[in-house]
Image (cartoon, rainbow, N blue to C red):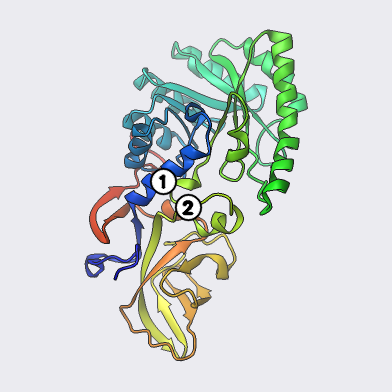
Amino acid sequence: MNNWFTISNVEHIDTPALAVYPERIQENIRILKTFAPDIALLRPHMKTNKSPQVAKMLIREGIALFKCATIAEAEMLAEAGAKDILLAYQPVGPKAERLATLTARYSQTIFSCLADNIATAKHISTVFERSAQKIRVYIDLNVGMNRTGIAPDAALELYKQLLALPGIIAYGLHAYDGHLRDVDLAARTQKCNEAFAAVEKLRDQIVQQTGNTPAIVAGGTPTFPIHAQRNGVACSPGTFIYWDKGYESILQEQPFLFAALVVTRVISLPAKDTICIDLGHKAIASENPLTNRVTFLNAPDLEPTGHSEEHMILKTPAGSTYQVGDVLYGVPYHICPTVALYDRTAIVTDNEVTDYWTTQARNRVITI
């Protein structure tokens, strides 16, 4: 009997390949909705899947808000029919012009973006005023990750400055706390609440001093169940859609299913207890330690010992009988950048590849 992941017509699949299992995607969407008291406040991040087909699956399930990181992802979402899209990125340089072109083309879609300083906000305002448009802007808050954003206790003045800019609408606050990855949910919750307290304080100050109530978008996959319990706060999980080994090992309270795998073949037997497969750096995310990059569902005892552009070297257990051509099914430790390495995905239904989807938004540019 086949395991859920095996592909009956794998002999026709060139490797390395990315295999996607739509029935498991559908189940992950169902699980996602169980975490949210109000699905109207779910704003999934599309950086993981970059797929118009997945976007349409989410839309059919009542998801109305979306988040993305690139202009291409935003264009993909708009073309797929998304009605509210947050570009969770500060558009510096030509990105602002590209964003204005996008918003003009899809005028029935609500677009937003981020800003964390007045100089960039003025640039966005100028670009949009020039095109006779306005765009909603969320202030990007640094709540401890120290990657982007302004400290919440310094953001009130920036919000007031945004109110005076003609090309933008000062609309909300964005707080990404992706650094909070404690395995213990209680510890993660405590740290999340402590970080979010500064966001709540800033929101209250804005209400008191301007009369506006800013929208809030908070969290990623590790903290979205925590933020989902907050009244009126939108949350933005992304990895849930395909899931990966990294988050499965950390987020034990989230029962999502692996829905995307790398498929690879043994291509050489260079030495005793050693095999080589065609899963190089170009086929799987390689930012993590070598031993963590992939887990093979049908060969969990294989131990990676070397990795290069087109090859992965694996030590085999004593007595193994691997042959050239054997197929392995691997769960990436980090699925998001792995997906971006593939221009298309093999769609597996009932253990058979029946179609291919393009990973449309892996490109930096679609048409804009």
Helix, strand or loop at disc 1?
loop
Q: Give the residue drawn at x 58%, y 50%.
A: 253
Q: Nearer the viewer, residue 303 or 225?
A: 225
Check the image and report above or below for 149 versus 250: above
Q: Give the residue drawn at x 49%, y 14%.
A: 134
Residue 126, how many percent across, how many down?
54, 16
Q: Give the residue drawn at x 53%, y 31%.
A: 37
Q: From the image, tell me which residue sits under label 2.
A: 243
Check the image and report above or below for 90 versus 332: above
Residue 296, how many percent across, how many down?
45, 70
Check the image and report above or below for 76 versus 279: above
- 286 lies left or right of 102: right
- 255 lies left or right of 341: right
Q: What amino acid does circle 1 point to? A: Asn
Q: Give the residue drawn at x 45%, y 54%.
A: 257
Neighbour class for label 2 at 10 Å: few (<14), some, many (≥20)?
A: many
The mark nearer the N terminus, 1 or 2, is 1
Q: Nearer the viewer, residue 91 or 36?
A: 36
In the rendered image, the quadrant that contains the C terminus is top left
Q: CA distance from mark 1 to mark 2?
A: 10 Å
Q: Is residue 368 visible?
A: no
Residue 269, how many percent across, how many down?
39, 86
Q: Which mark is residue 224?
A: none
Q: Nearer the viewer, residue 51 or 307?
A: 51
- 215 lies left or right of 45: right
Q: What amino acid does circle 2 point to? A: Trp
Check the image and report above or below for 143 versus 334: above
Q: Which mark is residue 49?
A: 1
Helix, strand or loop at disc 2?
loop
